[in-house]
Image: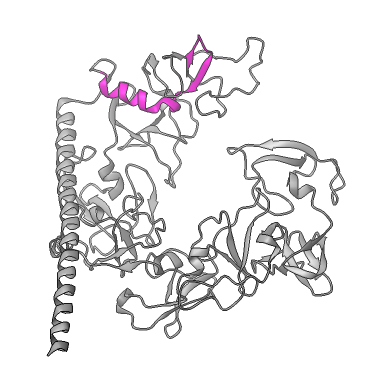
Amino acid sequence: MQDFDHKHQLNPTTTEEEDKDERCEVCQERILGEAYSCTGCHWWWHRPCAKLPRQIDHPFHRQHPLLLLRRAPYSSGKYSCAACGENRTNYAYHCPICDFFLDVKCASLEPQNGETQMQIQPISTQPHPHPLIPCSKGSGIHNFSCSYCDLPLEGMFLVCLHCHHSVHQSCSQFPQEISHPINQHRHPFTLQSVVQIASFCHLCGKLITKRFSFQCRKCDDLNLDFRCASLKPTKISHDLELQIQNFSHPHPFTAFENPMNFPFSCRLCELPIKDTIFTCFQCKLIVHISCALLPREIKRHPFHPQHPIKLHDDNTQSCSCEFSCRLCRSYQGRHNRDFHYECLDCKFTVHSRCALSMPLAVKFKTHHHPLAFLDLKKSNARHHCNACRQECQSGFFQCVNCQFALHLRCIPNLPPTVKDKYHRHPLNLATSPIKDYPDEGDDAEFFCDSCEKRRNLRDPSYYCGECHYVAHVHCVTSEVLRFLQDKGQDEVNLGSESDTALVEEAKQEITELEKEVDKLQTRLVELRMEEQSLLSQLKLVTTRLDALKKSN
């Protein structure tokens, strides 16, 4: 195919998720799936972007047609999109009479029913002051996120050409001025455009990535991102409040409910928070109730049984604010405020989430220390297998005491037979190459039948000869780990009897703590129900009292 603005022939191609981060020359978005490429220039195009019309009539600018330009007709080459307000330098649709610009992505938006001045009246008492245009994504290749909450926009959403934003209908109905209890702040917060280049939310401490936030007009640099501003304070039981006060954290926690069901993750364990959210305003910390009640001390952790490890955070004077977690090897700098457990005598430090995750510990004859199985998806450290020297990108075994690591596929004594949930027959371990067809060369592409991603012919795999079904070793991770747990004291064992006793003792301690937290959560629900019953009785008594006063 010959592109309208490229001198070379474009070749059809397909990119996959694990390929490099190729971006379209027209819209600058990442390319996944079918595309065009120029091998000489190393340029890429989405197939729809390579076939864009030179001129369009768009409902956002009915007065004149828009012409496709490779760059803005200014010396800087920059322009501001009339829909999203972003400054761009790539392709755009332009009206030379009105100097109106739409980037290629926003030009793909389709107003519903062709209406551009349809006013969606918000439910709140403070409606948006400008016309909101109902739109949908016209092309499947472009992704849009809400200018308020930063979540993906699907189906119908609303666009304001005056404010240059696109929002969910539910977000547009949120009040544009609110009060918030953060630090007992007395001034209202107003939804405004973010002026500073780097603004941080004063509740969660994260960088505000969207162009709008709630700000205090009277206090400089006091911002709340939209999601944190939507949280509503809630009451907790007196017993639970006493439990939290006894926690080693030096500042009080405030409880919030999440009426808009925005996704929040716990700063400590990084798991989603589905119930009450607890926050520390001073530390900009958001946690589960169970994580807010972390044990102050773990007496015999399986990877450091010789001394207790104690809970610390950046506000603990004796803690090391900069450290590398001994389990996940992630580095924490001074700007982070993660809780962690630490033994000051041995300089042994682990994240709280790593300390309580209790990974499987296995002792192999190939290494003198126990190895922990780690499935690290958010680690900023890089690990390399000591057997094959390749990078460990999925679950792998690592020594806590040194840098020794092994891929799951590189451990000795893999189970000879496993089951895969996607196949009905048992799979047998194959250490020799398994090709799809006998006449294929070693440089051909081979794929795993379980995850449908590429597999390396030289790596061990699991194979069903009857169906010619081949799976990666890491695609049957649960089966391999179960085998290692059940394996006796032959070539793979779970450590000495003393090590096993320590592990079991630590597991029992954590189980008891989890049961205590469950009891507290159950009691919290009961107290809330009692509170609602008492409030109903109080309302009934108040109504009767008012009636008696009127009759007298």
Q: Residue at x 29, y 78 (%)?
A: 184
Q: Position of residue 467 (x, y in %)?
A: 52, 12
Q: Position of residue 31 (x, y in %)?
A: 66, 45
User: Is residue 481 within the magenta segment?
Assistant: yes
Q: Residue at x 36, y 43 (%)?
A: 328
User: Is residue 247 within the magenta segment?
Assistant: no
Q: Describe residue 418's horizontal placement relative to residue 86 as left or right.
A: left
Q: Which residues are magenta?
A: 462-487
Query: For the view shown, which residue lies furthest in the bottom direction?
Result: 552
To which quarter of the image does residue 304 belong? top left
Q: Residue at x 51, y 69 (%)?
A: 172
Tell me the quadrant of the picture where the C terminus can be found: bottom left
Q: Position of residue 40 (x, y in %)?
A: 80, 41
Tell me the quadrant of the picture where the N terminus can be found: top right
To which quarter of the image does residue 370 belong? top left
Q: Looking at the image, can residue 391 be seen?
A: yes
Q: Is residue 334 above or below residue 479?
A: below
Q: Describe residue 57's horizontal placement relative to residue 201 as left or right.
A: right
- The front one of 375 and 479 is 479
Q: Looking at the image, can residue 300 be seen?
A: no
Q: Is residue 267 above or below residue 100?
A: above
Q: Position of residue 352 (x, y in %)?
A: 28, 50
Q: Describe residue 377's horizontal placement relative to residue 305 as left or right.
A: right
